[in-house]
Image: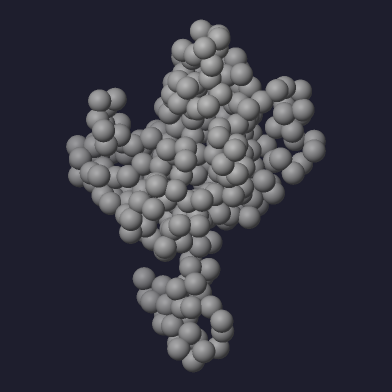
Amino acid sequence: MERSRRSFLKILGISTLGLGTLSSVDLLAKAEVGKAGFAPDTKGITGKRWALVVDTKKLDEETTQKAIEACHLIHNVPDYGDQDDEQIKWIWTDKYEHAFPGTEHEYLAEEIEEKPFLLLCNHCANPPCVRVCPTQATWQREDGIVMMDQHRCIGCRYCMAACPFGARSFNWKDPRTTYFKDKEPPNPKYPTRTKGVVEKCNLCAERLAVGEMPACVEAVKDSKAIVFGDLEDPDSEVREVLHEHFTIRRKPELGTNPNVYYIV
């Protein structure tokens, strides 16, 4: 706490003296951003542009549920029940017409029409959520992962309005005093959130930092239904899969350049 206070006062002093072109808020953001970004250790997995390929042909109901549960348990995502309008989701399912609007037609195969598609944050190369955040609580790492810093979030929900994929959830309740009131969070190593902040998938940045794959990928590794890798690496598995299969992305016409691909 004392170190943070000294850092803030130092930055504020530099700004006051006019020894730079950035505001004190900008400088503070740059100083603090690394702390929430899960910098990799010597065993960490690094890349230039991370991406996922979801093979919907390999995802059945059981496998899909495994991916969702793994993500939500590891990140202490509260489950308020399917009927709760205040449900928090990092990864979820929806029908084709909602996942890929504008591409459905009257002759769409029934299997595709009724199939639950696994959805999550697309970690877009051009993320609109980052541009609208007034406090830099949501920001993009150099490897493309779009992060959330709940300590900076003021709950304005601009990012939710800007995201065209519905990938963000708002904590209308305090999970610490509701869902986790009478039980311990499943993962004591990952922080729980508070009322009034937004949260979403972080592509398991904290796991990549210690050399582990994203939880959803790890949970379905036997089926290889979800492939993770660096798009900038021509020898990566994700590039190999994209080269061999026809894939689609969600709402590509919007220009956000999603980094999650689907084999249908």
Vertical relation: 219 (above or below) 185: above
Q: Quadrant of the N terminus?
A: bottom left
Identify the image quadrant of residue 54.
top right
**245 and 39: which is toward the camera:** 245
Say which residue appears at 32% left-offset and 45% top-offset: 170
What residue is rendered at 53% in x and 20% in y? 104
Q: Tell me what residue is drawn at x 58 percent, y 45 percent.
A: 256
- Check the image and report above or below for 153 versus 219: below
* Residue located farthest toward the right when viewing the structure as drawn: 235
Identify the coloring: one colour
Q: Residue at image x 44%, y 58%?
A: 133
Residue 187 visible in the current orientation: no
Q: Quadrant of residue 50?
A: top right
Residue 140 as seen in the image, left or right of residue 243: left
Asked if one can make out residue 152 in the rendered structure from this viewpoint, the answer is yes
The C terminus sits in image quarter = top right
Q: Is residue 46 left or right of residue 76?
A: right
**214 and 200: which one is in front?**
200
Residue 172 picture location, percent across and down: 25, 44
Q: Is residue 129 left or right of residue 142?
A: left
Query: Residue 178: x and y, percent?
Result: 20, 40
Q: Residue most toward the bottom?
A: 17
Residue 213's spot in the image, x, y percent? Answer: 59, 36
Q: Position of residue 202 (x, y in %)?
A: 50, 44
Give the total of numbered labels.
0
